[in-house]
Image (cartoon, helix red, strand yellow):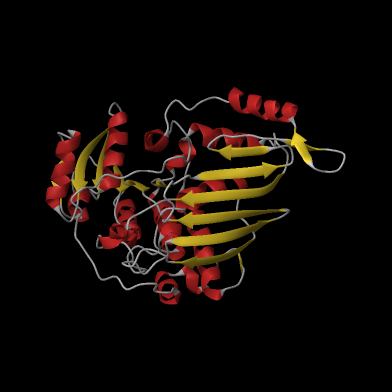
Amino acid sequence: MQGVAILGSGAIAAVHADAYLFHRDKCEVRAVCDLYPDKALALIDSKGLKNAKACGEIDEVLALPGIDVVSICLPPDVHCSAAVKALGAGKHVLVEKPMAASLEECDEMIRAAGQSGRLLSPVAQNRFKTPNSRVKRLLEEKTAGRVLHATVNSLWWRGSNYYDIWWRGTWKSEHGGCVTSHAVHHIDLLLWMLGRPERVTAVITNTAHDNSECEDLGIAIFEYPGMLAQMTASLVTHDEEQELIFQAEKGRLSVPWKTAASKALPNGFPEEDTGARQSLQAAYDALPSLAVEGHPAQIGNFLAAIRGGEKLAIGGIDGRNALELIMAVYKSSVLRAPVTLPITPEDPFYRRDSMSAAMPRFFEKKRTVENFAASQITLGRDVGK
C-alpha cells in the first residue's frame, strides 16, 4: 500500500484525492499539506481521508513515515522547489501542469529525478481519454494519410474575478495566462500526436481581464515539414468548444470525434467521399475504449510504474516539451517574429527571471484575495469527449 501526500488543497487537489481514492486498494492518502491548515482539514473531511494528517509545511510532510508519493497541486511558482525537495527525500512525484515556471526548472526537476532514482510525472490527464487515444492511433497508423493542416482550439471562459486569487495573473507567480495555464492541455496533446514543430509565430493580448498582467487571448502558427498547425488559446469564449482537428489526405479526424471526406469533381470542386468517410468511421469505432480515463487513469499508471508493473506513460521530458512550446509562443509574441525550436539554455526564455522581465504587463494586478469562498472547477467541456 503506497502512502500518498497531496501538497496544496485547492480545487485540483480534490481531483487528485478522488483519483487516489479510485485506487484505494493500492494506495492511501496519508497527508494533505497547505499554507492554510484549515483548508487541508476541509479536504480531508470532505473526501473521508480518515488516516490523513493535515500539515502546514512540506518538511513536515516529508518527515512523516509511510509517504511514498507526493502529488504537487501548488501554484506553478513552487512546482520545482517542491518537486526537487520531495525527490531528494526519496519520494515519487506527480506534478500538476504546467510542470514548472521555466525550462531551467524543468531540467532541474528531471536531474533530481535521475539522481534520486524516483519517478517524476507531470499531469497530462487528457492523453487518457478514449477519443484522444483513438485519434492518436489513427494518426500513427496514417489511416487518413498524411496530415496537411491541424487546428487546436483551447477555448475557455473565465470571469475577470478569476484572477483575484493571490497567485494568479502575474508573470512572477503564475508565469502566464491562458497559454500556460489552459492551452497547456491542448499543446501537450498536439505534441503527443504530431511531435514538435520546427518554427512558431504567435501574438498574445489581454482583452477582458483587467486584474491580470498576462494574456487572455493568444494565436499561434506552428510550422511542421509539409504542414501547418494553428492554435487559438482563449479565456473569452463563452461556449468553450475545445477541439483538435486534423485535416489529412483522405479525410478529417478530430476530437471531439467527427470525420468527413471529400473527393474531386471533374472541375476540382468537392463532393462527399462516402466510402472514405465510412472507412474512417469504421477504423475509429474498431479501436478499444479505455476502461479508466482522466486523472484516475494517469494516477493508475503512475502507481503501477512505481511498482514496476507498467512503463511510465508521461515523464519529465513530456512536461518540458509542452513548456518549451509555450515559451516559444511567448518569445515570438515579444519579438514579433518567428521563433525556431529548440530553446537553448543561453536563451532568455529558458530562465524564469529573464523570461518574466521580457513579457508585457497588460494590466496591473490590483485585487487580491487569499481564498475563494467556493473552489468548484470545470476541466473543459469537450476535450476528450
Residue 139 visible in the displayed image: yes
Residue 342: where, in percent of width, then height?
58, 63
> Which quadrant of the structure image shows residue 139?
top right
Residue 214: where, in percent of width, then height?
39, 66
In the image, 303 versus 248, the foreground residue is 248
Numbered marks: total? 0
Q: Is residue 231 left or right of residue 110?
A: right
Name the image quarter holding the N terminus: top left
Q: Residue at x 73, y 53 (%)?
A: 226
In the image, 110 versus 155, the foreground residue is 155
In the image, 1 versus 23, the foreground residue is 23
Q: Is residue 323 left or right of residue 146?
A: left
Residue 200: where, in percent of width, then height?
60, 63
Q: Residue at x 73, y 37 (%)?
A: 250
Residue 167 visible in the displayed image: no
> Which quadrant of the structure image shows residue 381?
top left
Q: Is residue 129 left or right of residue 36?
A: right
Residue 275: where, in percent of width, then height?
74, 26
Say above or below: 152 vs 271.
below
